[in-house]
Image: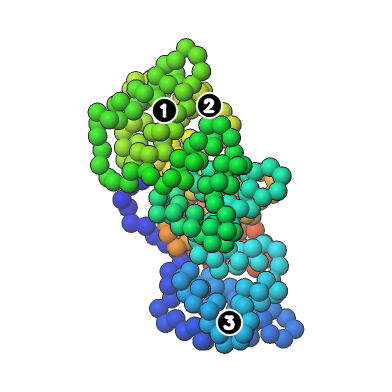
Amino acid sequence: MGNMEMRPTVTPVDDFSPEADCETLRDAMSGRGTDEDEIMAILANRSTLQRQILKEKYEGEYGDELLRDLKRELRGDLEDCIMAVMDPPAVYEARQLRKAMVGPGTDDEILIEIICTKSNERIEAIKAAYAIVFERSLMEDVRDETSGDFKTLLSMMLLAERDESWEIDEDAAEADAQAIYDAGEGRWFGTDENEFTKVLAFRNYLQLRLVFLKYAVIAGNTIEEAIESETSGNLQKAYLAICSITKDVHGYYAQKLHDAMRGVGTDDDALIRFIVVRSEFDLGNVKDAYREKFDNGLWADISQECKGDYRRMLLSLIRED
């Protein structure tokens, strides 16, 4: 994934005064109207940890829950965005996974996007948050909602056992590349997805890059081309997401943000998900990758695509280029 410096767009504010913030928030929600500007000015400019302190302080000061008051005062996409920033990221992602699995049908895109792209530590944190918030097992729910090779892949990812070292082994990469080739393009009939899954779920990212290079030499085409010809549906999408994250994590998120704004209508859930979750981690890097890929800045595209207070909240989180 590369060892470059991560550039968040949202960082803790230095002269943090929970008392003053809570008073401002309370005033913004008192009386007849709601002062969305004041709410956004505070919540877009505090870290996750600082927002958790505000929740506690607010309840201590006023005997009311900050989230309940915010929910009562806000509407639509702005409400969704504010609710998203008020959760610790692992809790927010646990909620997104639950939402993707509740009701008829499952939103497999969200399962892929969260489960297939995270570090071991983050997967463990999401599993723990899911157990606390919903009193259910994420592993069991995912297994109930999915099937076949896709279920096997997600189950392996949820074990959180990827090698996260920076070590590479050329012989092992060659062996993995050959095994994948023999299991897919090198077979007369069918594909043995287990080989693909084993390699993509457990090897470290540097090692995977080497496997992909070796594969291209053996097969005469890219690993992505092999995945596209040998697999289909959700499994194919999940494999391709892992390849994309392996090669360029910031490019992956830039593409996702772009996709959320393409075509008719905007996928606001996706925009909120990517911007909120990456804002304290590497959204600065993602913005650079976005400009490189699409010639337009993320700021400009969101300005064009979204409206009103919601747009201002997103722009506050991504910061001007």
Mark 1: which secondary structure?
helix
Q: Going 27% across and 45% down the picture, which residue do you hit?
A: 166
**Residue 4: x and y, percent?**
32, 52
37 on left or right of 255: right
Question: Which one is closest to the eye, mark 3 or mark 2?
Answer: 3
**Which residue is at the front of the view, 125 or 209?**
125
Going from N to C along the chain, the mark reached first, 1 or 3, is 3
Amino acid residing under circle 2: Thr
Q: Assess disc 3: are there few (<14), some (14-19) or many (≥20) residues with their C-alpha within 10 Å of its C-alpha.
A: some
| Residue at x-position 51% and y-position 73% | 51
In the picture, the disc for residue 59 is: 3
Residue type indicated by callout 1: Glu
- Determine which of the numbered discs, if any, sits on residue 231 in the image: 2
Location of residue 128 with respect to 239 vertically, above or below:
below
Label 2 neighbourhood size at 10 Å, few (<14), some (14-19), many (20+)? some
How far apart in space, not on screen, are marks 2 and 1 (Cα)? 13 Å
Dot 2: what SS? loop
SS at mark 3 in the image: helix
Q: Residue at x 40, y 78 (%)?
A: 14
Is 242 left or right of 212, judged from the image as shown? right
How far apart in space, not on screen, are marks 3 and 2 (Cα)?
52 Å
Residue type pointed to by label 3: Glu
Outermost residue on the top side: it is 188
Left or right: residue 227 versus residue 62 is left
Q: Which residue is mark 1?
A: 195
Residue 300 seen in the figure: no
Query: Gap in Å between the C-alphas at discs 1 and 3?
Result: 52 Å
Label drawn at residue 26: none
Q: Are marks 3 and 2 in contact (CB under 8 Å)?
A: no
**Quadrant location of residue 125?**
bottom left
